[in-house]
Image (tube, rainbow, N blue to C red):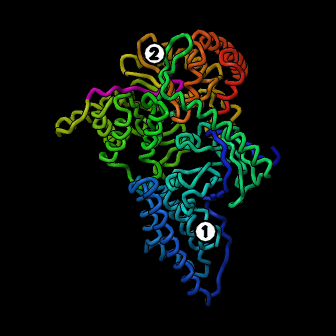
Amino acid sequence: MPGAIHGVSASPGIVAGTAHLLRWEVPEVPSRVIEDAEIDAEIQRLRAAVDAAVERLRGVKTRAEENAGAAEAAIFDVQIAILQDAELRGRVESLVKQNLAAEKAFDLVMLEWREHFGRSANPMMRERVGDLVDVHIRLLSLLLNLPDHDPVGLEPGANAILVTHDLTPSLTIQLDRRAIAGIATDAGTRTSHVAILARSLGLPAVVGLIDATARIQSGDRVILDGTNGTLVPRPTTAVLAQFADRARREAAVQKELDALSGAEAVMSDGPRVTLRANVDLPDEAERAVERGAEGVGLMRTEFLVVGRAAMPSEEEQVEAYSDVVKAFKGQPVVIRTYDVGGDKLPIGGFPHEPNPFLGWRAIRMCLDEPELFKVQLRALLRAAVHGDLRIMLPLVVSVDEVRQARFLLQEAATELAKQGIAHRADVPLGVMIETPAAAMSADSFVGEVAFFSIGTNDLVQYTLAVDRGNASLVTRYTPLHPAVLRLIARTVDVAKQSGLEVSVCGEMASQPLMAYVLLGLGVRTLSVAAGGIPVLKRLVRGVSAAGAAAAAQAALAAGTPRDAEQVLRLSLARELGDELLDGLLGLA
Ligand code: PEP
Ligand code: MG
């Protein structure tokens, strides 16, 4: 396609819309000095910009309240308070009185404050760094007369394609899903969190576009092809018609798949497969039920923390978890404890680490902050009275971590019992197998946990030492690498021998070729974003356990990811036929 920008397909679907360029980065500030005679006017200009920013933030807050809820929106009160802080204002104005232009003065003071807050020993202070950055960008944009990139100005029905470098948590909570039809980012990969979020929201997305923000302007007409991973700027009428035709065909196949929502996921030679949903935000639960999910295989709880001004209360958590458990009416709902850290940091909430993916995150952070962790555990035990809630621990490397978590869980249950608060003390506790350490020592967890769930997104990254979010490493991020397949096979074997349930909740499960190898390795429970369930169901119904097992053995024996892919593709084409296979690959 001439002029198309190629990236990575992150969430399927084709949409034509209007580009909304979102540049959320601190702008370059030219050095400028002013004459003595200009000082008063400059201070007035600064104050007017602060007032305008506060006004804008009030609007942003109202929208965020509608989109994400009052607790999430509270972060904007913090930003308003920063802008109105007398000390900050005094410092900036004193630099203006020393003949610095307002933007330069503000820039210098904000850099100083960010540095100071970032180094603070007090976590509450460190948590404010992200807010300072947002305020820094917002006021400089006003003082420098830069275009307003705020996504909050978009009206419902705007059919906007958001084009941005990367989607940060603070931007994400501002997005109005009624206004946005698709997402395109320069950074990111299929397993980075913007891609996962887009799939959860059912929004077409292309990531890893490298320089889309430099090639697209706000207001440009664009076609976003999430299925093939391209963004076409300023398409001709002929190209538009071609895409509309494809979109119609895809919608027709999708409709056929949706009709399967009540059907069982049974392989052609008998075995039954359980398809569950990954839920990133509580309000996705309903959609997952409609798509035929048999429970939740992974509920991420980071939405409660990331981009928020404060940690969520126990009551708020009880409500969020209970809503999902109730929506599934007695089917299993696996809720993962906080997996914050890595690229999912709450705004500025943790010390900067040179190697965040190997750092203080997930279960490590929770065990080191038992008071914070126990609030979540108490909420989970309380929500469990509404159905079949199960607790899952992320990034586990050793059974010691499970024992410590269980100790805290028991403490939480004892406290609740003493306080006479309704709860369930017998909630199953499982682990994610997402590190080579956990997979290699899977046998050591037997007798200590109730289930395994293989998190391939991280397992692949840690096994291959390839950053899952780095767009320039996409071709090296190969889930079909023999090392990865062997670790999965080993985990599944341990689970089967000891009668533990094993599922896969990483993105491998949503891609037909890879789901096929997982079935062949003996996995019978898969968990994917709700939108991916129909494709998976069609796949399962079209293949045999015997065929999948033979293909998986051949893939395991293949020396390279490419050879493994070829073996799987051939076998799958034999089982499904080329046309159906192509259709499913296109929609995944
Ligand atoms: C995984 O690592 O595969 C996983 C499911 O968890 P996340 O993508 O949230 O890290
Ligand atoms: Mg993970």
Kindly indicate whether the residue at mark 1 contacts the one at mark 2 (C-beta within 8 angstroms): no
Q: Is residue 527 magenta?
A: no
- How crowded pointer 1 is (Cα within 10 Å; few <14, some 14-19, many 20+) is rated as many
Above-or-below relation of 229 to 389: below
- The quarter of the picture where the N terminus appears is top right
Q: Is residue 51 left or right of residue 319?
A: right
Q: Is residue 433 magenta?
A: yes
Instruction: Using the numbered discs, state the Cα–Cα distance from disc 2 to disc 1 in whole angstroms.
Output: 55 Å
Decide which of tag 2 and tag 1 comes sooner along the chain: 1
Residue at image x 28%, y 26%?
Answer: 426
In terms of depth relative to the viewer, which is nearer, 524 or 145? Answer: 524
**x, y (%) of residue 404?**
34, 30
Tag count:
2
Please give the residue where the numbered disc 1 appears in the rendered image: 141
Q: Amino acid at mark 1?
A: Ser
Q: Quadrant of residue 152?
A: bottom right
In terms of depth relative to the viewer, which is nearer, 283 or 96? Answer: 283
Above-or-below relation of 480 to 353: above
Residue at image x 64%, y 58%?
Answer: 20
**x, y (%) of residue 425?**
26, 29
Above-or-below relation of 212 to 555: below
Q: Which residues are magenta?
A: 425-440
In terms of depth relative to the viewer, which is nearer, 177 or 240? Answer: 240
**x, y (%) of residue 249?**
68, 36
Q: Is residue 234 left or right of residue 187?
A: right
Most extreme residue toward the bottom is: 37
Q: Is residue 41 left or right of residue 397?
A: right
- Which secondary structure, mark 2? helix
| Residue 495, label in figure | 2
Whether residue 478 is visible to the viewer of this picture, yes or no, is yes
- Which secondary structure, mark 1? helix
* Residue at disc 1, CB closer than 8 Å to ligand 1: no
